[in-house]
Amino acid sequence: MSASREDTAARRPGRGAEPYTLASLVEVAATAFLERGYDATSMEDLSRAAGITKSSFYHHVSGKEALLRGALDRALDGLFGVLAEPAALEGPPVDRLRHIVRRQVEVLATELPYVTLLLRLRGNTETERWALARRREFDQAVASLVREATEAGATHPQVDPGVAARLLSGTVNSLIEWYRPGRVPVPDLVDAVERQVFDGLLGASG
Amino acid sequence: MSASREDTAARRPGRGAEPYTLASLVEVAATAFLERGYDATSMEDLSRAAGITKSSFYHHVSGKEALLRGALDRALDGLFGVLAEPAALEGPPVDRLRHIVRRQVEVLATELPYVTLLLRLRGNTETERWALARRREFDQAVASLVREATEAGATHPQVDPGVAARLLSGTVNSLIEWYRPGRVPVPDLVDAVERQVFDGLLGASG
DNA sequence: GCATGCCGAACGATCGTTCGGTGGGTAGAA
DNA sequence: TTCTACCCACCGAACGATCGTTCGGCATGC
């Protein structure tokens, strides 16, 4: 019975506004980090974006690193969720790779601020290094698939599979540098990236 | 006779070590920025990397932003130098594009720390916004070439040329995320990127 | 009356930058 | 050669500003 505290979670604050949940503040933070960068964004900036003072902001969040951690968690959950999908686990390597690339583009577009934060990490703190390690796991899963596809004779034999995998990831991840919601429809983006990655600029399936 | 001061320029310091030129300190700084990021790198870090104290460091450099400016200048000079080469100005659009991509990879590999700094800018200061504007010029020159190639019927007609150009730049620029000198021979890298960009993973030229 | 959301003020730490001084080497006069 | 004046790379210490974070108090609603 002493655990009845959880039932009253997500209570409204005094005024009629929406409550400041951790997730909502992580969203605010990630959006700000996307524009100015993590280091260059102060807690003053974040609290102002949330509409409260800096000290009030600390009433809801334990610190700056917790916001980073929350955002990175969300990004990594999205990416690893793709790897767990049935179409990413069954079938010929090339088809599985194709599915992962398409879904990864969707995740990048949908979770843009979070994934951007993940891809810009430098590994300066323990939290950053932990996230970088998990991100490396994801990249290595994709690299393994590229290697399998190469061994199956589906790709350029002249290009080192490791290098090819890095260029593949680089192409997909470069979306964060220019894509912004609403400009290009996500389905069009998915198709464009798939063509560019598998067929190149010149095109093979004429 | 009061102008004879210039003749004694580039004099050696007391000890037999090499002098601290602006270019040499920019190199030290860019290397440090590459690892930890610009904001996260302190002047204390830089001076320690140069082997002198922070105050001595300021004897040779006017400030942190001057180091950034120097590094960005070097990166932009390298990139625009590629655009000025004869092979980038004459011939069919696709051939010119191919040459630019190949040379751009070489510049990225050769000037890695400087270009990395350029590609990670957020536009927080006036200097950063100036460099971003010049970088946009470069990207637009490449985008125009992609558009020309598309109009000549050399590329996928289904993909928007603007998106294709961004993916192209993204693929090339993603090198800074993983390439480090000595791991992969530059000529191999150039070939791999060219194939990936123009023919894709699957390959078109049998 | 008590918990909770909010705030102003201030904390210590660290940042980029400045300043006064010092020591060794050099050039010029004796 | 010796003396002297100067220059310049170098340094320790401290500056003001800003950072992330903490604390004590005020108001509101159950």
Image (spheres, coloured by chain):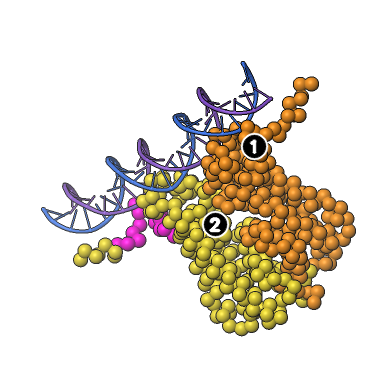
Chain colours: A orange, B yellow, C blue, D purple
> Which residue is labeled 2 in the image?
B121
Quarter holding the N terminus of chain B is bottom left
In the image, is residue A200 above or below residue A51? below
Q: Position of residue A108 (x, y in %)?
A: 71, 55
> Which residue is labeled 1 in the image?
A16
Secondary structure mostly taken by the magenta-highlighted segment of the chain: loop
The answer to which of A40 and A94 lies nearer the viewer is: A40
| Element type where label 2 sits in the image | loop
Q: Is residue B132 left or right of residue A90?
A: left
In the image, is residue C17 above or below residue B91? above
Q: Which residues are magenta?
A: B8-26
Task: Answer whether residue A53 is visible to the viewer in this image.
Answer: yes
Please identify, in this view, whether the residue under mark 1 or under mark 2 is nearer the observer: 1
Q: Position of residue B153 (x, y in %)?
A: 71, 80
Q: How many C-alpha atoms fall within 10 Å of the one at disc 2: few (<14), some, or many (≥20)?
A: some
As shown in the figure, which amino acid type bears the numbered disc 1?
A: Gly
Q: Are marks 1 and 2 in contact (CB under 8 Å)?
A: no
Task: Answer whether residue A167 is visible to the viewer in this image.
Answer: no
